[in-house]
Image: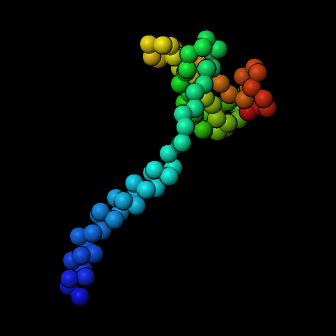
Amino acid sequence: MVIVLVLAVGCWPAGQALALGAAAQQAAPVGTLQADFNNDGDSDLGVGALFEAVGAAFAAGAISAVAGSTGGLLGGGLLFTQDTAGVPSAA
């Protein structure tokens, strides 16, 4: 009985780490999504804000986009919501 408990306690952290690692690998995306929000030919970075208020709409959501270039990310950014011109529906 003592041997079983010692083995169980000794293996628990390793087993838990393996289980968490397997879950993380399953949740990871298979490919990379690239977006060009400002149509300049370079990939931009979009960050979602799920609970962003838009006008009177609480938790409508938004996307903040940072422009990219061949040298990396540039300063500034764009904010897109369902109230942005060209985006379907409404907040």
* Point 36% across, 59% down: residue: 18
Is residue 81 visible to us here?
Answer: yes
Vertical arrangement, residue 6 with respect to residue 13, above or below: below
Tell me the quarter of the picture where residue 9 sits.
bottom left
* Point 54% across, 42% down: residue: 30
In the rendering, at what x and y percent does residue 13 appear? 29, 63
In the rendering, at what x and y percent does residue 40 appear? 61, 11
In the rendering, at what x and y percent does residue 69 appear? 50, 13
In the rendering, at what x and y percent does residue 23 appear? 46, 55
* Point 61% across, 29% down: residue: 63
* Point 47% across, 17% down: residue: 73
| Closest to the observer, 8 or 50 | 8
Q: Residue furthest bottom?
A: 1
Is residue 74 visible to us here?
Answer: no
Q: How is the image coloured?
A: rainbow
Assign the N terminus to one quadrant of the image: bottom left
Count of all numbered marks drawn on residues in the image: 0
Vertical arrangement, residue 45 with respect to residue 75, above or below: below
Vertical arrangement, residue 14 with respect to residue 78, above or below: below
Tell me the quarter of the picture where residue 44 sits.
top right
Q: Is residue 70 left or right of residue 59?
A: left
Assign the C terminus to one quadrant of the image: top right
| Closest to the observer, 74 or 80 | 74
